[in-house]
């Protein structure tokens, strides 16, 4: 009995030693390819333009958020709730550090919302949506799923958009002056 346990510990320590050698001498990309079969794609809320070094909102992030918001109210455990100024309905969205599992053509896909504190003169934090999937579904996710998600997000954004109608302010008399030529009416 003692010899079997002793041999098991010797084999386990040899295995741990070999794993550490592999970690040390095998390039990180090869090691991660062998041990982690998942791919991560990240979408930042705010991106930096290369030429001008200025900040701008990422349009893809807004569409992804529009796609994930209805799913978050059904699936997520932690949800943010907001009431817009002119709206009567509550808006539910994914809370920070929350994960949603989506499925597309039988493929399991994880979305994770994270934020990072940033030392920038215009930003205090940077939000990021991360997409995680198995590497064998790479082509399907990149070419089909992301097109599907962006299309659905665009549809949801267009359906929830409110239009503001403007009309001309006609002059009521010959010499009367109105400071604005346009007046806005109710939002549709």
Image (cartoon, grey):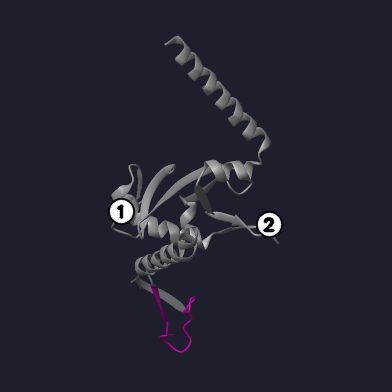
Q: Residue visible at 48% across and 44% down?
A: 114
Label located before the other in sequence (1 or 2): 2
Which residue is at the front of the view, 138 or 94? 138
Can residue 84 be seen at all in this image of the molecule? no
Q: Which mark is residue 45?
A: none
Number of marks: 2
- Among the 4 quarters of the image, the one containing residue 89: bottom left
Q: Which residues are magenta?
A: 164-181
**Residue that label 2 marks:** 53
Q: Closest to the observer: 56 or 165?
A: 56
Magenta stretch encompasses residue 47: no
Please name the residue that numbered disc 1 is placed on.
90
Q: Is residue 120 above or below residue 151?
A: above
Where residue 136 appears, as percent x and y from the top left, is 47, 55
Foreground mark, 1 or 2? 2
Q: Position of residue 52 (x, y in %)?
A: 70, 60
Residue 102 seen from this side: yes
**Residue 80 location (% of width, % of height):** 36, 46
Q: Is residue 24 above or below residue 164?
A: above
């Amino acid at each position: 009995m003692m010899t079997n346990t002793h041999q098991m510990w010797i084999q386990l320590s040899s295995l741990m030693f070999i794993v550490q050698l592999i970690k040390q001498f095998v390039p990180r990309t090869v090691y991660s390819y062998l041990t982690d079969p998942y791919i991560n794609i990240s979408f930042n809320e705010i991106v930096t333009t290369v030429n001008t070094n200025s900040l701008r909102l990422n349009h893809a992030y807004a569409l992804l958020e529009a796609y994930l918001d209805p799913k978050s109210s059904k699936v997520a455990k932690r949800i943010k709730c907001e009431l817009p100024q002119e709206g009567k309905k509550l808006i539910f969205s994914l809370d920070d550090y929350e994960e949603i599992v989506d499925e597309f053509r039988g493929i399991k896909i994880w979305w994770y919302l994270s934020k990072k504190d940033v030392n920038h003169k215009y930003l205090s934090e940077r939000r990021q949506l991360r997409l995680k999937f198995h590497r064998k579904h790479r082509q399907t996710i990149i070419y089909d799923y992301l097109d599907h998600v962006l299309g659905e997000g665009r549809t949801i954004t267009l359906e929830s958009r409110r239009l503001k109608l403007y009309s001309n302010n006609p002059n009521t008399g010959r010499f009367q002056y109105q400071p604005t030529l346009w007046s806005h009416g109710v939002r549709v």
